[in-house]
Structures are given as structure tokens and as C-alpha cells.
Amino acid sequence: MKSRFVFATSLGLSCIFTFHSISAKDPNDQNPFEGTCRSSLNQWIKSIAGLPGSEDENLKTQKSSFRDGSFWLIDSTPSKNWDWYLLQPQRENKLCLIFQTNAFQVRTSERGKRRMIFSKIRGSGNFPSREIDFVFEKKNKTFQPRKCVEIRFQEEQSIRKRVPCFSFLESEASLGIFAGVPTRILEGEFHLQK
């Protein structure tokens, strides 16, 4: 019993510190592409989907509304939330990953210097649907979650409940799953991985 409490406490604390230090790059991160650049869109497609990726009908691109030329590379494989990779053109003809999430719908908005990303994550079974709004923080050069909403459906009616963004991470970490939790978001100077 004591070992389970110690494990749960250490897991919870590590999630807290990981979530609040969202702009730090963890070498053990599960997303090997985050914060990296590739020389072309085809290189990104190969990195994400392998060599036959260029023939995959589930991979597509979509413009974002950001003025910096960023666009989405989307893996729209049916029966799951889609994988969204926000790629930004950088100098030296490189495309760099500045944001990645899993959602069935993503929208961007730029008003003056304020850049925002709105994501909707499809629920499954007893798991509610979720909406997460991200705002770009220039100081940290990251998109940070600002508003999080759970949507539960009962008797053909949707019930929306605003929740702390940390609760999304906390509830899924306790279950040992991380689907639908946004990965860390990075922007700035990147190194090309070979």
C-alpha cells in the first residue's frame, strides 16, 4: 500500500513539474520531432509516416491563419483524433515544428500580436470531449493552454464545464493514458536532426 502511495505521489509531482515547465525540452520526450526542423515537407512526411507516407491519403496540409506562413500537416487517419503538426518556415529553407496536438478539429486565430490555437478533442466511451484554447506567450516562445472545457453528453444534451487545464493531464496520467493531451509546444531556434 505504501509503495503505491509513493508511486502515485511521485507520478503526480512529476506531472505537475512537467506541465508547468512546458517550454523546457525533455530529452526523454515521447515526441521525437518536437522542436526540430526538416529540409522539406517530404522529409516531415517521411519522419511521421515512413517512406510510403507520400502516398498516404490520410496525410494532408492546411493553411493556418498565422501571417508567418505556418501551416498544418495533418494525419487524418479515421477512428482516432487526428495528429496536427504546425510547421513554420524558417531561414535556410527549413520547416520547423512549433506545435503538435491530437484533436478532431483545430482552428488558429491571429489578432494583432495575439496568436491563438483552439482545439477540440473527441471523447470516447465515458471520456468527455474537450476543448483547449492555447495562447502564444512571446516571453517563453510557447503556446500555453489558457481555457479548458469538458463536454459531457447526457440525454441528448451537452453539458459544458470549465476545468483547470491541469486536470486534463492529471486525470489521464492517473489512468496511464495520454491521448488527447497536448504535447509541449516549442518555437524559436531549432537544430536540424539527421
Image (tube, helix red, strand yellow):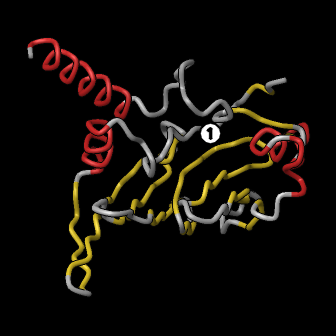
Q: Secondary structure at mark 1?
A: loop
Q: Residue at x 40, y 29 (%)?
A: 21
Residue farthest to the top, as pictured: 3
Q: Residues within 10 Å of mark 1 (few under 14, many from 20)?
A: many
Q: Is residue 10 left or right of residue 136?
A: left
Q: Amino acid at mark 1?
A: Glu
* Closer to us: 37 or 189: 37
Whole-percent x, y for residue 172 in the image: 32, 43
Whole-percent x, y for residue 166 in the image: 28, 44
Q: Residue at x 26, y 76 (%)?
A: 153
Tag 1 residue:
187
The picture quadrant where one finds residue 95 is top right
Whole-percent x, y for residue 20 in the image: 34, 33
Q: Is residue 70 left or right of residue 148?
A: right
Image quarter hosting the C terminus: top right
Q: Residue at x 48, y 63 (%)?
A: 119
Image quarter hosting the N terminus: top left
Residue 109 makes an appearance in the image: no
Q: Residue at x 89, y 53 (%)?
A: 54
The picture quadrant where one finds residue 29 is top right
Residue farthest to the bottom, as pictured: 156
Whole-percent x, y for residue 161 in the image: 21, 68
* Closer to us: 7 or 92: 7
